[in-house]
Amino acid sequence: GQLLSSSVVGGCLWVGGRGVLHVATVLNATAAAWEVQPDQPCQSMAMDPNDADHLLVNNASNRELYESTDGGRTFHPCLGYRGAVMVAIDRTGWYYVGSEAGIYRNAGGCRAGKWEAMFGRRIARRTGAVRDRVAHDFQAINIDFGGDPGGVAFGSDQGVFMKNVSDADMRTNLRLISGNGDMSNNIIMHPSIAMGEEPHTRYLVTALWDWGPVASWDNGTHWPSWQTADDGSALGFFGEGGGCFGVGRSVYSLCIHHHNVARSSRGGKNFSRFVVPNGASVGAPAFARRAGSRAEPSGLIYAPMTMEAPAWEVIVDTEVVCGAGEAIELGAHTRDGCLARADIGVQHGWHAGAAAVWRGATDSSCTLCAAGSPRHREGAVSFVRRARPALTPIGHDG
């Protein structure tokens, strides 16, 4: 390119523990005259390619967007917009901001314009449902894309999206063009493969980075995920990461991420959710096999996890005697199993109680009650709950 005498560049550079505005006039191939504004906090900035005095600055201290038309000597707010991470001005004078919340454009300026959300569109193959999505993990805004003065590309963790320049004035179309076509830019974390409900089919569910789990009901040919009432709801609580796991030759599927454990008895349809309490984080599971089989599960599932100690005081050789009509029988368990059943049931609101007893010297039964009166009993172990906020009650798959 040709070095112009008026070449000006700018950016947010680190000074004194924070980003501040820097503007430089290029003098020659090795030198520039720098103007540093230490009182102007700056996370990102844009310079108008047609006017070096016209700047947009995302203020790092209050997350608000400001405009200057005099090279940074004075600033005014840009329609109160907050939350931008990236900013840009294209050669047609349009403004753009981008973040995880999406890409927004402004064709009228910071005094009379308005911010409008741009979106990507997906149309469901099975149902024809239209889904417009604004939020993406946008990482960059590139002007002059494709050699068009109004062309702009937006890079994200989900791929590249482009401004539609097909309209005569580009003012009526907010829909982005996906540079990925029918592909998704995702990393498969761990897939579950289960027996499908149709002959010769396997249902696949996998956790992803980014966004969340997806599902296929036709051996991986299509990935509609959860679109119909029969599919059940999507795993909206799951988030990015985690993993999904098949349970051998069966119709069962598990998806696990931190304290969330999702279970399906239909290969991935109609998931139920279980929240493991006490700040737990659950690892990859393993299943026990039926005798003589390498693939058929017996029903027992094991998984490593970390967890805070349950908020119950353990008292050995003591039996809590429940008041009349208070006893809730939880069945036969090991000592730790009794504590787990009581703690999980109380935290999820399945039962009410603050004391439990395990009768290890007799029938290993486990009983929960509101409070109860303690008495000495060899081989019995009692558990008394300490104060801890209860979890919000959720449904469970018995």
Image (cartoon, rainbow, N blue to C red):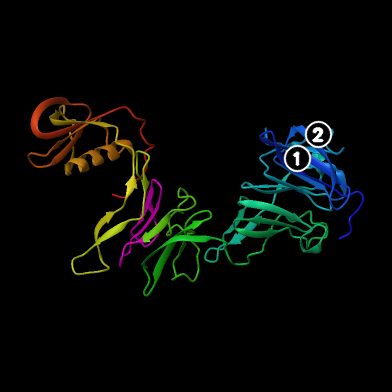
**Residue 8 sits above or below residue 378 on the image:** below
Please tell me how many numbered marks the rendered image carries. 2
Instruction: Give the amino acid type for the residue marked by disc 2 in the picture.
Output: Phe
273 lies left or right of 96: left
Estimate the spatial distance between the alpha carbons at disc 2 and disc 1, rounded to whole Å: 9 Å
Q: Earlier in the sequence, mark 2 or mark 1?
A: 1
Q: Please report the residue visible at 39 percent of the width from the left and 37 percent of the height from the top.
A: 392
Where residue 325 appears, x then y in whole percent?
Answer: 17, 30
Q: Are marks 2 and 1 in contact (CB under 8 Å)?
A: yes
* Residue highlighted by disc 1: 57
Neighbours of disc 1 within 10 Å: few (<14), some (14-19), many (20+): many
* Residue highlighted by disc 2: 75
Q: Quadrant of residue 246?
A: bottom left
Q: Please report the residue visible at 75 percent of the width from the left and 40 percent of the height from the top.
A: 57
- Magenta-highlighted residues: 246-273
Neighbours of disc 2 within 10 Å: few (<14), some (14-19), many (20+): some
User: Does residue 274 appear in this view?
Assistant: no
